[in-house]
Image (tube, rainbow, N blue to C red):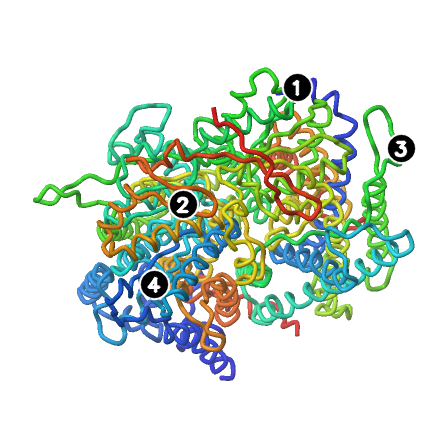
Amino acid sequence: MNFSGLIQDFGPLTITGLAQGAIIALFALGYTLVYGVLRLINFAHSEVFLIGSYACLVVWGFFGLDQNSATPNVMSVIGLLLLGLVVAIVFSGLTALGVELVAYRPLRKRNAPPLAFLITAIGASLFISETVGVMTQRNIKGVPPLIQPRDVFVIGNMHVTNLQILIIVLALVSMFLLDRFINRSRLGRGIRAVAQNPDSAALMGVNKSRVISLVFLLGGLMAGIAAVMYDLKIGVTRFDAGFLLGIEAFTAAVLGGIGNLRGALLGGLLLGLLQNYAASLFGTEWLHAASFVLLVLILLVRPTGLLGESLGRARA
Amino acid sequence: MTTEATSSPAPKTPAPGSMSAQEKKNAREDRGGVRGWYGRQPKIVRIVLGVVFAALAFLLPYVGEIPLLGPQIVTQGIDWPSALFNMSYYVLLALGLNVVVGFAGLLDLGYVGFFAVGAYTVALLSSPDSVLRTEWGWLAAVPIGLAVAMLSGLVLGYPTLRLRGDYLAIVTLGFAEIIRIVATSTETLRGDRGFSDIPHPPGEFSDGKPIFGVADAIPYYWLGLAVIILVIFAVRNLDNSRVGRSWLAIREDQEAAEIMGVRTIKYKLWAFAIGAFIGGLGGVMFAGQQGFMNSQTFILQFSILVLAGVVMGGSGNIAGAILGGALISYIPDRLRGIEDPIWHTDLFGFRFAIFGAVIIAIMIFRPQGLIPSRRRAMELKDREKEVAPIE
Amino acid sequence: MRQVLVRAIGGLAVIGLIAGAAACNSDSGSDDTASGNCGYKLAYFGALTGSSANLGVNIEQGFELAINQYNTKKGSDCITVAKFDSQGEPGVAPGVARNLVADKKILAVVGPPFSGESEAAVPIFEAAGIPSVSPSATRVSLTANGWKTFHRAVANDDAQGPAAGNYIKNVMKAQKVFVANDQSAYGAGLSEVVEKTLGSAVIGKDKTEADGKQTDFSALVQKVVSSQATVLFYGGYYQNAGLIRKALTSAGWKGTMVGGDGMKDVGLAKAAGNGPATGTIVTCPCSPPEKAGGTFVADYKAKWNVDAGTYSDVAFDAANMLLQGIDAGNTTTEKLNTYLSTAEYKGIANTYKFTDKGELDPNYIKVWTFKFDPTGNQIADQEVPTA
């Protein structure tokens, strides 16, 4: 154990951990939204993220950009970023809707037992990631350096870069908007109603089917944003990138209290930080083990996560 | 109306869980289809049929000899007896997971952890690479391996007793990942370097050649099959005993069960321990056949696949678990070395993608699994009555 | 009723899918042409799918290229390529290996690529007497198993590690070196030897998870930066190495990354971007292909439309060595195995001669360093002593 290293590097580890945590939190929202409404682990959500992470690369590829291109000028970077975000969001959203349509809706119609949903989700996840794997020959795909990390400010040995600020701010803004949407809008009220009590909501005239599609779509949008951020931060994507980060995102969602939007944010950031601290303290190979140990410990004390499940309750 | 169970005119459907022996018998005989016919036969016929079925299973390695049909069944890209052996430990795992998920209703996503514990214990005790330097024979290491696996089931079960449903799922998943990471990252468990020269099961032919060698997988398959048959008997008896009824009560409504005097903690721990025991059994078999193992074997996808197998086959039903476990191993293996009819490329690259599609298709057309549990089918019928259709 | 019908159709569809696929099994041609030492098969055994597939594909393509060229030269489909996908997993390997040995036309195997699957599969080849030549399994202990048919066309970790260490110490003259590995049998073994060679120059150590299991290396990067090391030695494969290199550059680290042959792949530059990858040093127990004067690099690109990757050249050599043996009339597995134990073959990456344990003859082990240039190619740097 390397305490002096952890103390010395505490600042830098915090900022990089927050950036990673913000991505995980955005990704976790999809799990939390679907769980909040359907009480169902959407295993295929990892592939929603995967499709987003490839979609923006393909579009940037149309502009002749790859990992070796020079960084374009500021205006085109902003344009490309926005375009990449839109495309990733659209494709992730469509994937989420597609999964809902193919793998979940037929089962809902048949009143299938909850486990059946879990298994079709696994099937869908396998199908999408393996198809991408075959199509990309299981190779990595590099990301154009749209943003060259540059220090914005420095505190001690903590260098805060433009990319980290972008990731954290974008995540917080998307979270805030989503929170407002769920809590203030008419459609958001429908989601909360179905989350609280599907049958009463149906009696009150809420179209459950539409609410469910909307929830999948929202989760997809957030995953799309997370995917673009991930691409820019890590610099590479691969057919199993979704699965890998998906486990972390799901852990984060449960950690904060699955079904709870703010829980996902808290869980994501906490997980990002903890992974970094643990990697510094025990060695990078223990990074994932640390997150699971934390999860088990927290669930032992608070069996429904830090903030509890409450998408349907008064405060989301 | 989705299962064959409900297609027969069952005049008096007993409430699940409250069946007396007579009612159970009636329920068995009221059913249509093959299973209904089987249920109506006298005991002796059922025993004979069971024996015939087991004998056929033992002859499976030679199925390739049957003209026309045989070559369609055997795997192309992987040695058929080896594929059968792989199926046998998947079936074992499915049987064990069925106890945890199907009987007791505890969603376990990290079942491969117990498989790993069993296999690693054997490796530690028997491989010359181990720090223990005991170099026991395989058979001597097996009881210890099973005991440690069972213990690990209790260790996992105890702290998670408070957790329900999906929380349990992620915690068990976490446990399996922790086991994998510990196996990868600690010196004692040798990580990717693994353990070599793990002894095979003992036994020699009269000419001095070992029965369990490296070149022929048929003896391993037969051993696996024998173990499976024993496990089937044990699990069946458990399910029909007080323990099984308690599991059912816990699965259906934990609070109600507790109020009625079912000691939920005790029976949940039973489920975990028995599940872990059977998982460990799969692990020790695997280690004995393989001779070499390292941390790469125990990946998360493995547990997820086994769970998919159990649910696909029919959660809560022994026959279903066997079929599901066999299929998750068989389908990907069978797709090796096959050409697709249109572009004439080898399908093996696509085999997991195809497998994913097959899983979705099976679950959509048979949400209860291929061979649904009788009790589960009734529950579904109950639910269809009480819940207003949504769409 | 409609439901029943739908169900029945669905069930049929599933069965049809499997049976339909089954109906068109790729047939493994049964014509025997024994004339001119033809009609035999050489097999590739290793990962073609799964998370370690890319290294396997590199090797398979090098192997297949050699056989294609041989067949073109012969003007017939003399030697057939047989591919066996082990997914690189020791758990899968034995079943596939038993399938391989069931095909009596297979005279030899190129593979297995990884040390783990070698442990699981080679005993089966050994029992069947089929010789194997691995282009990339470098675990030292593999040759201590007493196998008669196992050969490796590559120096083991004990040879490459000291070379890398010496290069860092004597050529780069680095005082502060950070050593990390991916915990694979290959990476861990290599970095241990490097650590030993470097001694007190090692100022920090860390481990990561394997390729494809981890993508965020922030903590490792921070450790390297804080340690003020000028060199990072990473024992592992190119994907992780590329990601780490990119993250290091992003964090403003100016030092050099050094690694073994597992990182000698254009994939490193693909993951890191050519800019950050430039200057990265990899050691390889092989000679630069351009020294051999052949057209391998161009041929490979022409055939597969990708650049030759790690071990493609060694696999190409291993296949050619076996083809030369078959051409000389060694058309049984026993004869071919005997041939391998005596033959000396000059290939594009090296000259090959095996010891009785199947190791590459120490006199032929050459370790070169290669440097990533700004286009992502690995340019031969210099030959380094192994002791």
Q: CA distance from mark 1 to mark 2?
A: 38 Å
Q: Are marks 1 and 3 on the same chain?
A: no
Picture residue at 72% right of the left edge, 35% below the top = C248
Q: Of marks 4 and 2, which one's residue comes earlier in the chain?
A: 4
Given residues A307 and C135, the one toward you in this image is C135
Q: Are marks 2 and 3 on the same chain?
A: no
Label 2, on which residue? C346
Given residues C27 and B271, the one toward you in this image is C27
Do labels 4 and 1 touch, CB within 8 Å?
no
* Mark drawn on residue C175: 1
Dot 4: element: strand
Q: Amino acid at mark 3?
A: Phe
Label 4, on which residue? C79
Do labels 4 and 2 touch, CB within 8 Å?
no
The quadrant where residue C12 appears: bottom left
Quick check: B322 left or right of A11? left
Judged by depth in the image, the label closer to the viewer, 4 or 1, is 4
Q: Are marks 4 and 1 on the same chain?
A: yes
Q: Are marks 1 and 2 on the same chain?
A: yes
Q: CA distance from mark 4 to mark 3?
A: 64 Å
Image: A308 above or below C255: below
Dot 3: element: strand
Judged by depth in the image, the label closer to the viewer, 2 or 3, is 2
* Mark drawn on residue A153: 3
Q: Amino acid at mark 4?
A: Ile
- Residue at mark 2: chain: C
